[in-house]
Image (cartoon, rainbow, N blue to C red):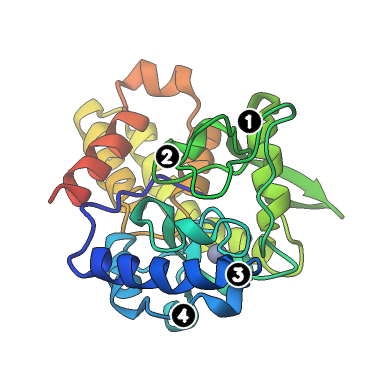
Amino acid sequence: VIRIDRGAEPGGLSSIRMEELARVGVIAASRWPTGDDIADRYVAVRDHLRERQFGKCAYCEWHEQPKRNDLEHYRPKSRYWWLAWTWENLLFACRNCNQPPAKGDQFPLEHGSRELGTHEQPPGEERPLLLDPASEDPIAHIQFVPERHKGHPRWVPRARNGSERGLETIRVLRLDDAENLLTVYQEHVRNLIEPARQVIVEALVSGDEARVRETWKREVCRLLSPTMPLVGLSRDALDHFFPLPVRQRWGLPLDELRHQLFAMLTAR
Ligand SMILES: [Zn+2]
């Protein structure tokens, strides 16, 4: 999960929202609307979000099959039907993340917080445990760590500093699913991070400060660009291979570059 920027609401959504709220409001007068009652009038919005998210799933950050990806409701449409056309509630996400056994209609709340009433707008007194990539930096809550498994190292997402929201987000979205994503993480580190690591180590061994800084900047800008998959994993792998004291010794920025790249590529 990594920060996204939706940009402004696309034209056309507000008239769809008005029509659909009126239509589903009639259903809601006699029974609770189901997911099937929410018509699929999302094609334009989905394409817009796909572009804003650089073709990546908002949750797992993978873009292997963008055509199969769906319009996703952060607050599930089966439980919050009146938010089903609200721009701030919409994301572009893959089916592995947004359909059971992953998210589905799960939307866990912090203990003691109160679910929104019908027609109530967020946040109200609701404190969601699922991270919202459009309004916060999920890297503060989720950390990829290399763990040994049957003698081999593998990268696994864990709650950073015991974050309850990080833990719940990993559980709901099954981001540590061994069958599926752990292999993707492993191949990403092997094919993209390891070669970059080698080039940076070679520069460090040369002792040439200008070369070190230039190599670092080039490799990090490539790996942490929001157009790239799995930026959260890349960031933590770089932090693992080149810990803060090493970066400070050579003057090598990490999160500063990530924030700059994000601001540059999402400004519009
Ligand atoms: Zn996904």
Q: Which mark is residue 39?
A: 4
Mark closer to the observer (4, 3): 3
Mark closer to the observer (2, 4): 4
Task: Give the mark nearest the N terminus, 2 or 4.
Answer: 4
Task: Give the mark nearest the N terminus, 1 or 4.
Answer: 4
Mark closer to the observer (1, 4): 4
Q: Which mark is residue 201?
A: 2
- Amino acid type, mark 3: Pro
- The quadrant of the rendered image in which ligand 1 is seen is bottom right
Element type at marker 3? loop
Lateral position of residue 256 relative to residue 232, left or right: left
C-alpha distance separating marks 2 and 1 = 27 Å
- Amino acid type, mark 2: Val
Residue at position x 43%, y 60% in the image: 91
C-alpha distance separating marks 4 and 3 = 11 Å
- Amino acid type, mark 4: Ala
For the residues bearing labels 2 and 1, Cβ distance under 8 angstroms: no
Residue at position x 62%, y 58% in the image: 79
For the residues bearing labels 4 and 3, Cβ distance under 8 angstroms: no
Element type at marker 1? helix
